[in-house]
Image: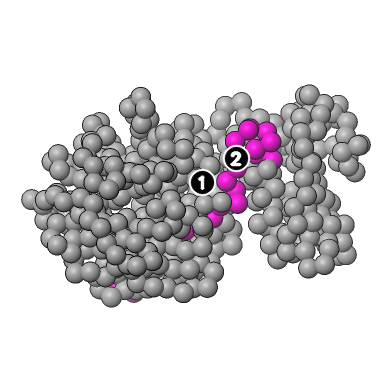
């Protein structure tokens, strides 16, 4: 029975990694907040020679619109933007329907561009703040994401996550001609970059806390092995290639350790690896399948999936070796937990009659809220500000990514222009 369950789990992992190629992701809001906040983003003036190298204002407006919280007013309806904060008049912007206004300009300097911008509360007729961000000219798009983060925080009070990146797996070809790729892109799907290619499955990418490295599982040597991959230099190193299964790697919050599931001694159990020495500490010792570990933000405990109760469920264990406490009881199964950055909730995959859907567990009240309605929603990953969860989904038989807000009200669809995308992971800021 144990072997059968293990085969089913591995088959599920492999199915997630097959399909046709990752490309530029197109992000579409499929469900937003009723009564979204009207905001105007004026075109950012370019005060250098020639045409603007990047439309920063358009990127900021698109980011805010994709959050689902804002109704971004079209440029054709905007009044003439003030030349600076001293020229701001609330009346024309209120007449255009805006409650908030963003204006900005770009000033070229030696080997960089200074983005200067201001955020106004139109209804209160006041400036919320003014900011300057110096960025290399080739990183203007990244600078626009940072502007978006600041605007989001000025209006909502919550940190933005537009500067974060996403990693995901794509596949090209069919049958024996399939090729798997590990991709990294901006949060809006732009600037995709292929880090690694293989004709064997790639799974479970996860970012290091400093955003410099990814760990993932690769079958390039015809067996599951765990690799560490520097995103900028491309340097790779094998971390785990023990006999049996090497799977589900996840970084500790301090970046010094890795939790993973190994079957080196028989049944899959959880281990913690010291990344400096390579030393292993066994965390669970059971005849069950223990896998999919996730660290608490303080690094003091692990959440994980185990079938010790007869079906996969989520448990919590204090480190270095406390008793495992079962947390999930609803649905036919539960697994693949991801922990919110504040440590107050889990989002996980809940199995039931409707298929596989994402659910959120409040760790204090134990209340469970279903977040998605798909039939095959898997691989959740929290945004670094905790506002959204990205996950794998299907659409008419095609692998796509979805994202949902922590309260379940905002939904997005992230699809490649061609092919399938799977197994997303949100980077730190």
Q: What is the number of the mark on residue 384?
A: 1
Picture residue at 26% right of the left edge, 70% below the top? 241
Quadrant of res 74? top right
Mark 1 is surrounded, within 10 Å at the Cα level, by few (under 14), some (14 to 19) or many (20 or more) other residues, namely many
Where is 244 relative to 316, above or below? below
Where is 315 relative to 418, above or below? above
What is the secondary structure assignment of the residue under circle 2?
A: loop
Q: Position of residue 215 (x, y in %)?
A: 40, 62
Where is 67 relative to 415, above or below? above
Picture residue at 57% right of the left edge, 56% below the top? 186
Q: In front here: 179 or 144?
A: 144
Picture residue at 21% right of the left edge, 45% below the top? 306
Q: In front here: 243 or 284?
A: 284
Is residue 198 visible in the rendered image? The answer is yes
Kindly identify which residue carries mark 2.
159
Quadrant of res 126? top right
Q: Gap in Å between the C-alphas at discs 2 and 1? A: 9 Å
């Amino acid at each position: 029975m144990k072997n059968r369950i293990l085969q089913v789990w591995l088959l599920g992992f492999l199915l997630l990694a097959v399909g046709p190629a990752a490309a530029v992701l197109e992000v579409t809001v499929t469900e937003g907040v009723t009564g979204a906040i009207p905001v105007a983003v004026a075109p950012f003036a370019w005060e250098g020679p020639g045409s603007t190298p990047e439309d920063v204002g358009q990127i900021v407006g698109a980011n805010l619109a994709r959050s689902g919280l804002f109704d971004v007013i079209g440029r054709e309806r905007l009044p003439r933007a003030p030349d600076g904060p001293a020229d701001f008049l609330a009346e024309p912007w209120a007449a255009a329907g805006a409650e908030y206004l963003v204006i900005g300009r770009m000033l070229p300097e030696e080997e960089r561009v200074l983005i200067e911008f201001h955020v106004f509360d139109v209804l209160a007729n006041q400036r919320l703040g003014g900011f300057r961000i110096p960025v290399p000219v080739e990183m203007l798009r990244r600078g626009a994401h940072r502007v978006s983060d600041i605007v989001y925080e000025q209006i909502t009070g919550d940190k933005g996550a537009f500067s974060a990146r996403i990693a995901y797996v794509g596949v090209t070809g069919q049958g024996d001609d399939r090729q798997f790729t590990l991709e990294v892109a901006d949060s809006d799907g732009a600037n995709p970059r292929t880090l690694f290619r293989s004709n064997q499955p790639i799974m479970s990418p996860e970012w290091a806390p400093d955003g410099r490295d990814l760990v993932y599982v690769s079958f390039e040597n015809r067996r599951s092995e765990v690799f560490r991959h520097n995103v900028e230099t491309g340097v790779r190193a094998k971390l785990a290639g023990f006999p049996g299964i090497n799977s589900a790697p996840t970084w500790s919050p301090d970046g010094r350790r890795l939790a993973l599931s190994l079957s080196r001694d028989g049944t899959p159990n959880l281990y913690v690896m010291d990344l400096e020495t390579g030393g292993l500490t066994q965390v669970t010792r059971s005849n069950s399948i223990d896998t999919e570990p996730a660290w608490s933000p303080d690094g003091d405990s692990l959440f994980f999936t185990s079938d010790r109760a007869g079906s996969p469920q989520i448990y919590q264990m204090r480190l270095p070796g406390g008793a495992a406490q079962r947390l999930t009881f609803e649905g036919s199964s539960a697994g693949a937990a991801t922990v919110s950055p504040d440590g107050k909730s889990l989002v996980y995959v809940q199995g039931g009659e409707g298929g596989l859907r994402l659910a959120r567990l409040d760790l204090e009240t134990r209340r469970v809220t279903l977040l998605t309605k798909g039939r095959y929603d898997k691989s959740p990953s929290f945004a670094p500000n905790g506002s959204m969860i990205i996950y794998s989904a299907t659409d008419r038989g095609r692998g796509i990514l979805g994202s949902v807000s922590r309260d379940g009200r905002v939904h997005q669809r992230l699809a490649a222009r061609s092919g399938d995308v799977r197994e997303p992971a949100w980077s730190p800021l």
